[in-house]
Image (cartoon, rainbow, N blue to C red):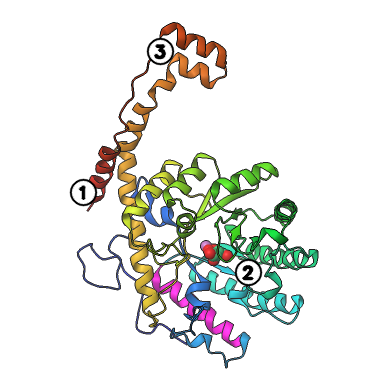
């Protein structure tokens, strides 16, 4: 059965001036950028949950989307098979290589863990065949530990160890499934790993529980020989009032405290960064500079309401600086850009899924071209080198190497009558240089 019959696919690359709405203007998979194919730089993936498992409902209203595979009167396993067919048809027609899913996106939950496991195994085997036939790859797998009422008070951080145990069973199974499908990463987003009120919460105890859970996951990963990367996905809040994995710096500190830095990296989501009061640029730069950069959930928020609206990315201005830091750090290894994106509830047509992804992918492709140019021209690196140049002096090196203490440094300052003059940071100038690169890249 064909679900997207209006679009023949695969979406072709056309020129920037083309007026074909179902074509890429910048995303040209084979184009070489800084010595690497564009497709290999961006490693774009489609998410199963928002694009195929969500009907367009919100807290005030029912689903609005035209998604025949979500028809509630269909037998759940038959519906899951139709959903999988729709998803793979879409991946093929969009022309991207990766996808990601939660256990419950792909297969219906059964009455018991064993039944859920059997359902998932059936759909995973079917997915394996489709992946082989189409060359589609799994960017990451993950378990949904936040939708079912049993997880209302958290999964790993639940006050009840039986809930922790149930979560362990789900994650073990999804790790097995991710390994089976050759997944390149495994993600843990702790949507309910936080609190609603501190009045009933033992925060320190919950942190120890979470660390035990993550340690068990890492041990199991090695036990089964899963070679992908384990990723934590920071978010400051929503659905909880406070999520423990608040942002990259918080996750970094947590990993260090529990000796897990060798086992986990971060999956940075644009809208989670902005929800945390950071820019996406900040989160990426932090992760790159601290060796924990893993992957990205590409989307955008709404600057006026600040929620996690998960809109399709459309701002080159927002993505250029972040892509710059990613390239500066050497680019993705196992990670990629996963479109963790939701159509607006009024975008009901099946074809809207194409328009959302095409615009977002072109935004990334154009941003990549500009960021690569900025790096190649050393526009920012020369400026940064000059700004930090003093640190290669004898004094700078002595401070960094620990050859000098506070007392002797202070003595030097007094003896020399040190009175450094302030230097301009030139922010407006550097902003202009970035804009010029944006405007001049065809
Ligand atoms: C929620 C979110 C999740 C994770 C995977 O805000 O981003 O979809 O990406 O559980
Ligand atoms: Co996400």
The disc, 2 or 1, on the residue closer to the chain's N-terminal end is 2
User: Spatial distance from mark 2 to mark 1, Cα to Cα?
Assistant: 44 Å
Which corner quadrant of the image does residue 35 belong to? top left
Q: Are marks 2 and 1 in contact (CB under 8 Å)?
A: no
Callout 3 crowding tier (Cα within 10 Å): few <14, some 14–19, many ≥20: few
The residue carrying mark 2 has its beta carbon less than 8 Å from ligand 1: yes
Q: Which residues are magenta?
A: 78-95
Callout 2 crowding tier (Cα within 10 Å): few <14, some 14–19, many ≥20: many
Question: Is residue 58 in view from this perspective?
Answer: yes
Q: Is residue 91 magenta?
A: yes
Residue at figure coordinates x 26%, y 66% from the top left: 14
Q: Is residue 263 magenta?
A: no
Q: Nearer the viewer, residue 362 or 122?
A: 362
Would you say 18 lies left or right of 331 here?
left
- Magenta stretch secondary structure, dominant: helix
Residue 418's label in the rendered image is 3
Q: Nearer the viewer, residue 407 or 178?
A: 407
Image quadrant of ligand 1?
bottom right
Give the SS element for disc 1: helix
Q: Position of residue 130 (x, y in %)?
A: 54, 74
């Amino acid at each position: 059965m064909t679900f997207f019959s209006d679009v023949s696919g695969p979406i072709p690359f056309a020129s920037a001036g083309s007026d074909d709405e179902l074509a890429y203007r910048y995303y040209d998979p084979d184009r070489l950028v800084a010595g690497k194919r564009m497709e290999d730089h961006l490693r774009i993936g489609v998410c199963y949950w928002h694009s195929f498992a969500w009907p367009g409902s919100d807290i005030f209203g029912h689903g609005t989307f035209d998604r025949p595979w979500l028809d509630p009167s269909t037998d759940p396993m038959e519906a899951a098979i139709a959903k999988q067919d729709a998803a793979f048809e879409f991946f093929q027609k969009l022309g991207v290589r990766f996808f990601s899913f939660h256990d419950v996106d792909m297969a219906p939950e059964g009455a018991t863990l064993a039944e859920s496991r059997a359902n998932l195994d059936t759909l995973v085997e079917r997915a394996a065949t489709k992946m082989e036939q189409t060359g589609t790859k799994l960017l990451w797998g993950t378990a949904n530990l936040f939708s079912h009422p049993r997880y209302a008070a958290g999964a790993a951080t639940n006050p009840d160890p039986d809930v922790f145990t149930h979560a362990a069973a789900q994650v073990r199974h999804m790790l097995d499934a991710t390994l089976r499908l050759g997944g390149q990463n495994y993600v843990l987003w702790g949507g309910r790993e936080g609190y609603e009120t501190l009045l009933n919460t033992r925060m320190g105890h919950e942190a120890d529980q979470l660390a035990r859970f993550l340690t068990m996951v890492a041990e199991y990963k090695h036990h089964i020989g899963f070679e992908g990367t384990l990723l934590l996905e920071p978010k400051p809040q929503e659905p909880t009032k406070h999520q423990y994995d608040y942002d990259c710096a918080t996750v970094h500190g947590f990993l260090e405290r529990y000796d897990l830095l060798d086992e986990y990296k971060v999956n940075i989501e644009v809208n989670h960064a902005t929800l945390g009061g950071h820019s996406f640029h900040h989160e990426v730069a932090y992760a790159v500079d601290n060796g924990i950069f893993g992957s990205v959930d590409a989307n955008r928020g709404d600057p006026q309401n600040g929620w996690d609206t998960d809109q399709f990315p459309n701002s080159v201005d927002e993505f250029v600086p972040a892509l710059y830091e990613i390239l500066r750090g050497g680019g993705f290894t196992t990670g990629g850009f996963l479109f963790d994106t939701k159509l607006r509830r009024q975008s009901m047509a099946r074809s809207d899924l194409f328009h959302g992804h095409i615009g977002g992918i072109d935004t990334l492709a154009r941003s990549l071209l500009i960021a690569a140019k900025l790096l190649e021209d050393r526009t920012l690196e020369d400026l940064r080198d000059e700004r930090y140049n003093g640190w290669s002096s004898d004094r700078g090196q002595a401070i960094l190497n620990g050859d000098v203490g506070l007392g002797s440094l202070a003595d030097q300052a007094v003896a020399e009558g040190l009175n450094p003059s302030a230097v301009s940071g030139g922010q407006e100038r550097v902003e202009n240089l970035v804009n010029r690169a944006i405007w001049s890249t065809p």
